[in-house]
């Protein structure tokens, strides 16, 4: 993220052509990159209180140079000014050389850190606080922010400054960095409470590293004791055993100290969270009171509104009842229910009678067919086809069949007018 540029720099040497030399005008190119904010002077970047996305005197100076340099050259060609007044390439290099910040790389690194912050759960105030060393261990290692690139201390300071001043994602001081949670209204400063929590967090981490180191030493002593006993060097084994005993005692003391510090840190974090909770309670109470103080929520106004609503509902119900009653009156007809019932019973009886007579006719046809078959004996003439019930016509007034719809050559059934039963003709 930091690019250094000096007279006889690597850039100029890289662009050298054999037999021609180094190109001129690189200082003007660097100045133009400054004007476009592709490169930013390191010192100005770290010390400026203005965002890099705002217009600053630095950009004004760069623009003045880009516009003024051609103007001075034109005046020189017209002999209005002496060419000695124009700065030489060497003088321009002296002004242009230095360390620059590559803004594009800074933005990329900041975006990667932002992605990691979004996936990190800030379950306690200590999770949002870092010392510079802790920040370097988490984000400065190779591949943590930029692919296969380990950030230097200067790179990290540039990144912290950018996240603080330009992105408003953190708050930083000389020795502390605080990640801001956008979902919680936290002060944009590092308070004394934050500083105390960070000191406890740092002490706990230091003790944990000490414990790891003590355990490693104990393991080494154990290994040396085993090796000494294998070769029969009991004196060395005894010495290593005494050293291991001392480390084990030290380990016990450090474990006790760690437990005390961890308990204290938890208590401090809990108290700090309680403070934030009480502030949220106060804010919520004030908001609720502000809402309840609205004129629409006063007791008299509420009662008046509810009474008006009940009255309007009652009127709407009355209108609906009137409309529905008018519709029923207009659609109703004076009908005798007893007469309808008698007519329905007559229709049912007539239908049942027709069904019964059809069944009787079907039974007579079956008897006649059996009789014909018996009289014919061995005659293999085709049997008389059955006549469907629908082929008979009835007199509407008496319900007596009068004829067969399909005449037969032999054995035709005709109604007997005396007995009112079908007989063989």
Image (spheres, helix red, strand yellow):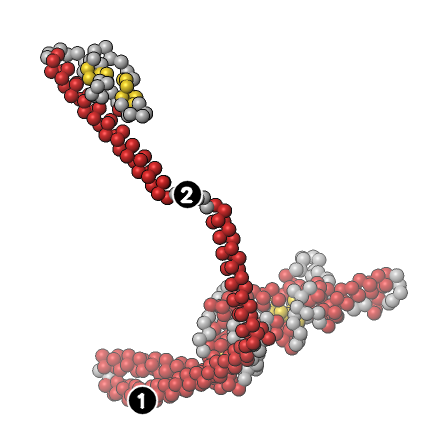
Q: Nearer the viewer, residue 105 or 259?
A: 259
As displayed, is residue 239 above or below residue 154? below
Q: Nearer the viewer, residue 17 or 326?
A: 326
Return the residue at label 1.
249
Q: Quadrant of residue 35?
A: bottom right
State which tag comes first along the sequence, 2 or 1. 1
> What count of labels does the image hold?
2
Return the residue at label 2.
335
Q: Residues within 10 Å of mark 1 (few under 14, many from 20)?
A: few
Q: Quadrant of residue 166?
A: bottom right
Residue 10, position as x, y percentages in the image:
63, 65
Residue 66 visible (yes or no)? yes
Residue at horizontal 23%, vertical 10%? 409
Q: Nearer the viewer, residue 398 or 324?
A: 398
As displayed, is residue 21 above or below residue 347? below
Q: Is residue 408 toward the left or the right of residue 332 in the image?
A: left
């Amino acid at each position: 993220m930091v690019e250094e540029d000096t007279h006889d720099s690597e850039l100029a040497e890289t662009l050298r052509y054999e037999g021609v030399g180094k190109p001129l005008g690189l200082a003007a190119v660097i100045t133009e990159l400054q004007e476009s904010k592709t490169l930013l002077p390191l010192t100005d970047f770290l010390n400026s209180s203005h965002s890099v996305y705002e217009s600053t005197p630095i950009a004004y100076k760069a623009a003045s140079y880009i516009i003024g340099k051609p103007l001075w050259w034109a005046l020189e060609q017209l002999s209005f000014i002496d060419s000695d007044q124009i700065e030489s390439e060497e003088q321009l290099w002296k002004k242009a050389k230095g360390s620059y910040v590559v803004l594009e790389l800074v933005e990329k690194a900041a975006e990667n850190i932002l992605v990691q912050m979004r996936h990190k759960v800030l379950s306690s105030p200590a999770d949002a606080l870092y010392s510079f060393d802790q920040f370097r261990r988490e984000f400065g290692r190779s591949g943590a922010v930029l692919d296969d690139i380990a950030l230097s201390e200067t790179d990290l300071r540039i990144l912290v400054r950018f996240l603080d001043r330009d992105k408003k994602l953190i708050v930083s001081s000389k020795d502390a960095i605080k990640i801001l949670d956008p979902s919680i209204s936290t002060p944009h400063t590092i308070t004394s409470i934050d500083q105390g929590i960070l000191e406890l967090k740092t002490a706990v981490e230091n003790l944990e590293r000490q414990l790891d180191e003590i355990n490693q030493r104990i393991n080494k002593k154990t290994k040396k004791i085993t090796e000494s006993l294998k070769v029969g060097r009991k004196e060395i084994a005894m010495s290593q055993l005494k050293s291991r005993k001392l480390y084990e005692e030290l380990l016990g003391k450090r474990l006790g100290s760690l437990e005390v510090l961890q308990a204290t840190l938890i208590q401090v974090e809990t108290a700090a969270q309680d403070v934030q909770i009480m502030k949220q309670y106060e804010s919520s109470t004030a908001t609720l009171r502000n809402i309840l103080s609205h004129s629409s929520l006063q007791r008299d106004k509420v009662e008046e509104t509810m009474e008006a609503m009940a009255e309007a509902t009652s009127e709407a119900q009355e209108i609906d009842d009137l409309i529905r009653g008018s519709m029923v009156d207009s659609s109703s007809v004076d009908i005798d229910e007893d007469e309808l019932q008698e007519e329905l019973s007559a229709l049912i009886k007539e239908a049942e009678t027709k069904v019964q007579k059809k069944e009787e006719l079907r039974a007579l046809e079956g008897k006649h067919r059996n009789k014909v078959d018996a009289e014919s004996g061995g005659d293999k003439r085709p049997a008389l086809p059955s006549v469907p019930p629908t082929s008979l016509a009835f007199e509407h007034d008496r319900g007596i069949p009068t004829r067969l719809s399909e005449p037969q050559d032999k054995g035709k059934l005709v109604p007997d007018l005396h007995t009112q039963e079908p007989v063989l003709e």
